[in-house]
Image (cartoon, rainbow, N blue to C red):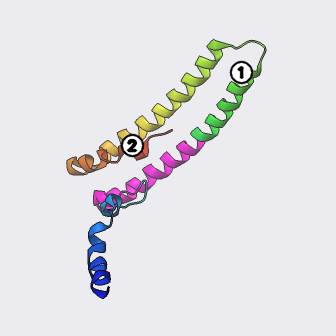
Amino acid sequence: MKLLIILLLLMSPLLADDDEYEYKERRLPLDVSYLNLSEHQYKKLVKIVKKFKHERKEFHEEEEDTTKEISELFLADTFDRDEFVKLTNRLKSLSVEIQADFFAKMHKLLNKKQKKDFIKYMKEWEVE
């Protein structure tokens, strides 16, 4: 009986599931430490990111207002399709503008190696 228990204890690590997420890189969203920025680049980046976050906050406020307007359109007796398209396109256009400005500034700031590293995490910087 003791032999069976010892054998089971020794084999238990073999039966355990491998946690594939345990080995993945862990980092905070919008973290740029992987870029190895110079002090000069870092100072510029701080300004760029502050502006980006401010614009993103304003975008989300605009998105809330637009959602309310769309709700009102839907609750009206007749649905104004053209107004819906106008509101939705305005929101998408604003999102693209904020993102394009940010990426243009990042492109100017980073060197080639940093750009290659940055593109792996570009999705984190999308305005949604």
Residue placed farthest to the left in the image? 113
Question: Residue 14, image x and y in percent?
Answer: 26, 69
Residue topped by disc 1 = 74
Picture residue at 39% right of the left edge, 54% below the top = 45
The N terminus lies in quadrant: bottom left
Q: Amino acid at mark 2?
A: Lys
Where residue 87 sits, quadrant-wise, is top right
At mark 2, the secondary structure is helix
Residue topped by disc 2 = 123
Question: Residue 120, image x and y in percent?
Answer: 30, 47
Picture residue at 30% right of the left edge, 67% below the top = 15
Residue 33 vertical position relative to residue 74 in the rendered view, above or below: below
Tell me which segment is drawn in magenta: 31-58
Describe residue 89's horizontal placement relative to residue 79 as left or right: left
Crowding around mark 1 (Cα neighbors within 10 Å: few <14, some 14 to 19, many 20+) is some
Q: Nearer the viewer, residue 15 or 120?
A: 15
